[in-house]
């Protein structure tokens, strides 16, 4: 029989801490580019009814212990009336979701009467031609300017502005007969004097709102809705909503963000998805 020593006890604690999801709360954020070829894409369970497609990044869909709001929002909808199909992929930006052909696949499946919820921004940050950024950042702005970059295979790519890509999603989704709703990116867990620091309000949030207005689609300022909710709860409570330092939510945080999305939907003019929500759910009350 082996007698445990202090060394064995310390080693046990270190292993346990490494495996515990809470250890990620103090880890640096990372933005991996998920290899989606290793898993099957979500599909509509009932093709004859409308489908709500979710398009975005890891803040909508992540691996445990991280979890995105797109993985929790389906619980608010009546599955007999609408499919909820989460096509978000970790590490994608408004730019790469299109250049990799993933948007074309969504478009090919869209039918009149379907819905699109689209959120990007986190991976669009950075310099568009920085090799370390893995080809993700868009040009910052909402104009028509472009910049040419060389891809690793030697081909050329014309990089557009974030606003241009968001308008493209909206216009092409509408052309397929879908109802398009653009969401601003969820906020980071950054605090100053008891308030959430809204780093993105004058950039990606504004550009998303402008793209929605220009394209004639609806807009949910998810960044502001969640930030206000966080401030009411306080930093200590909100810390449990995150599985890393400041970006990716835990399951609890993902559920909270999903409730915020539904609250945003409830506040839209004419509420296009009202008839598909479960009547017993009341996220408005939970978030106020």
Image (cartoon, rainbow, N blue to C red):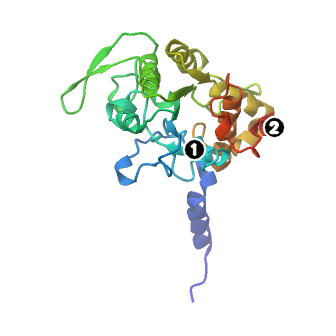
Q: Is residue 17 left or right of residue 38?
A: right
Instruction: Report helix, strand or loop for mark 2.
Output: helix
> Which residue sits at x=66%, y=43%?
253
Q: Nearer the viewer, mark 1 or mark 2?
A: 1
Q: Is residue 14 left or right of residue 88?
A: right
Q: To which residue does mark 1 refer?
A: 82
> Which residue sits at x=45%, y=41%?
89
Say if 122 sits above or below 138 in the image. below
Image coordinates of residue 36 in percent, x first then y, are 38, 47
Pointer 2: residues within 10 angstroms few (<14), some, or many (20+)? few
Q: Is residue 248 left or right of residue 241?
A: left
Task: Identify the image quadrant of residue 9.
Answer: bottom right
| Quarter containing the N terminus | bottom right
Instruction: Report helix, strand or loop for mark 1.
Output: loop
Say if 142 sits above or below 91 in the image. above
Say if 189 sits above or below 67 in the image. above
Residue placed most toward the observer, 197 or 256: 256
Per the rendering, the mark at residue 285 is 2
> Which residue sits at x=65%, y=34%?
189
Q: For marks 1 and 2, give the CA distance.
A: 24 Å
| Quarter containing the C terminus | top right
């Amino acid at each position: 029989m082996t007698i445990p020593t202090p060394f064995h006890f310390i080693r046990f604690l270190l292993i346990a801490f490494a495996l515990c999801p809470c250890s990620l709360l103090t880890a640096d954020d990372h933005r991996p580019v998920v290899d989606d070829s290793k898993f099957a894409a979500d599909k509509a369970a009932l093709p004859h009814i409308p489908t709500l497609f979710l398009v975005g990044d890891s803040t909508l869909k992540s691996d445990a212990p991280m979890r995105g709001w797109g993985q929790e929002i389906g619980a608010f909808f009546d599955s007999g009336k609408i499919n909820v199909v989460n096509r978000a992929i970790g590490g994608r930006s408004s730019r790469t979701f299109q250049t990799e052909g993933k948007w074309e696949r969504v478009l090919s499946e869209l039918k009149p009467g379907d819905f699109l919820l689209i959120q990007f921004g986190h991976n669009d940050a950075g310099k568009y031609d920085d090799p370390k950024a893995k080809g993700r950042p868009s040009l910052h702005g909402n104009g028509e300017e472009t910049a040419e970059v060389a891809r690793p295979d030697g081909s050329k790519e014309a990089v557009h502005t974030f606003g241009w890509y968001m308008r493209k999603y909206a216009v092409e989704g509408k052309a397929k007969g879908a109802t398009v709703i653009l969401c601003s990116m969820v906020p980071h867990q950054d605090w100053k004097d008891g308030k959430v620091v809204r780093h993105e309000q004058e950039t990606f949030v504004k550009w998303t709102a402008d793209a929605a207005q220009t394209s004639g689609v609806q807009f949910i300022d998810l960044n502001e809705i969640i930030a206000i909710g966080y401030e009411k709860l306080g930093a200590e409570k909100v810390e449990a909503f995150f599985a890393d330092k400041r970006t990716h939510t835990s399951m609890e945080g993902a559920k909270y963000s999903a409730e915020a999305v539904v609250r945003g939907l409830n506040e839209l003019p004419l509420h296009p998805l009202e008839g598909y929500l479960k009547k017993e759910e009341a996220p408005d009350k939970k978030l106020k």
